[in-house]
Amino acid sequence: MLNMVFRGASGRAHRFSAHRPDEAFPHAPAVYCFARPTPDGRGWTPLFLSRTANLAARLAAHESWPEARLLGATHILVHQREERDVREFVEADLMVVLKPIMNGALLDADEVSGFEEDEVAPRMVWAA
């Protein structure tokens, strides 16, 4: 259970390594996700997915980790990639298939019609 491969919407496979949150993370670019073990203990359920230019700095005090822990997250899955456009592709490719619950659902204009502007607050997630 230390490594996991997720297949994206493109059909491409993306390999992640599993790490405990108290590990020392490299000061390197990566795609990462907070994950909990699947009920059978043979895989991972991603709860939050993002990318960063500096994994160690980003995870040092991540604002979403406490929420992820409440949802059962025990590990951080890491897919290291140097190229920013590749990280953006991997994140987008997996977001479509994995639909991590903490990333929130994307709404189209038809779904929000009838609501006042201040009733629908999009969830903002920072990523480098």
Image (tube, grey):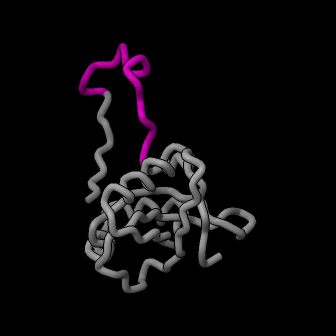
Q: Which residues are magenta?
A: 103-119
> Residue farthest to the right?
40
Residue 120 appears in which quarter of the rendering? top left
> Residue farthest to the bottom?
24
Question: For the C terminus, which image quadrant?
Answer: bottom left
Taking the spot 37% from the left edge, 15% from the top edge, the residue there is 113
* Residue 6 spot, x, y in % from top left: 59, 59
Question: For the N terminus, which image quadrant?
Answer: bottom right
* Residue 20 spot, x, y in % from top left: 49, 80
Taking the spot 46% from the left edge, 68% from the top edge, the residue there is 79
Taking the spot 48% from the left edge, 49% from the top edge, the residue there is 93
Judging depth in this view, the residue of 54 and 114 nearest the camera is: 54
Question: Magenta includes 45?
Answer: no
* Residue 124 spot, x, y in % from top left: 29, 45
Taking the spot 60% from the left edge, 64% from the top edge, the residue there is 5
Q: Is residue 25 above or below residue 118?
A: below
In this rendering, position of residue 34 left or right of residue 25:
right
Residue 57 appears in which quarter of the rendering? bottom left
* Residue 72 spot, x, y in % from top left: 55, 64
Question: Magenta includes 112?
Answer: yes
In this rendering, position of residue 87 left or right of residue 38:
left
Q: How many marks?
A: 0
Judging depth in this view, the residue of 61 and 128 nearest the camera is: 128
Q: Is residue 120 above or below residue 10?
A: above
